Amino acid sequence: MARSREDVRQNKAMQSILRGETPEKRIFVAMEDTKEKKERQKQIAKEKEESSERSEALKAARTPWFCPTCDKVMKKRLDDKMYRLYNHCFNCQLEVENKMRINGTYKEWEDKKVKANTISWIREQKESIEHFKKQKTPEFLQQVRPDGYSVDKEKWVGDDSLLIKKADEALEYLQKMEDSLKWYIYI
């Protein structure tokens, strides 16, 4: 059985104590590198600052525990959604919509919301078509051979001018739709 030097030293010290002798004196001096310690402290402070910045950035995205309008607990899933949309809980939104119905302004508000959502959808479609127009001819890599490492490249060839023409027609149609909706809503 292998024994470490420290075990051997401790055994000698115990034997000398049992014989009534004084064991060998050992002095331990702890030293630390002050330069490394300062660098480590700077690194720790920098990491804390970065995590604090991230926390501050995420604070706006978090839903608070209490509604800022009515001070009730926001624990429902609908409260979370309504807070992200309107900055208050679901019950407050129900009260707001109820007051609009009583005043007769709800239908107008609802129409504006529907049109704003439609315009947003149209803009997303236009953006995806623009992205589609900029793409190159597609290439696909397929592993068909049984050896397990060979790859075949499949390149599609087509009439790009026809695709670009159809994309331009779609963009023009979507622009007409957006223009016709902007007459009804002010963005």
Image (cartoon, rainbow, N blue to C red):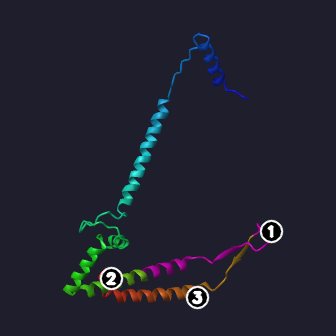
Q: Residue at x 23, y 68 (%)?
A: 70
Dot in front, 2 or 3 = 2
Residue 136: image x %, image y %? 60, 76
Question: Mark 3 or mark 1: which comes first in sequence?
Answer: 1
> Type of residue at label 1?
Asp
Q: Secondary structure at mark 3?
A: helix
- Assign a secondary structure to mark 2: helix
Q: Amino acid at mark 2?
A: Lys
Q: Disc 1 versus disc 2: distance between alpha carbons? A: 58 Å
Q: Residue furthest front?
A: 18
Sequence order check, earlier mark of 1 and 2: 2
- The stretch in magenta equals 123-150
Residue at numbered disc 2: 113
- Quick one: quadrant of the N terminus? top right
When asked about the image quadrant of residue 21, the answer is top right
Mark 3 — residue?
162
Of the two numbered discs 2 and 3 on the same chain, state the one appearing first in sequence. Answer: 2
> Is 15 or 62 nearer to us in this picture?
15
Q: Secondary structure at mark 1?
A: loop
* Residue under pointer 1: 147
Q: Is residue 123 left or right of residue 18?
A: left
In the image, is residue 136 part of the stretch drawn in magenta?
yes
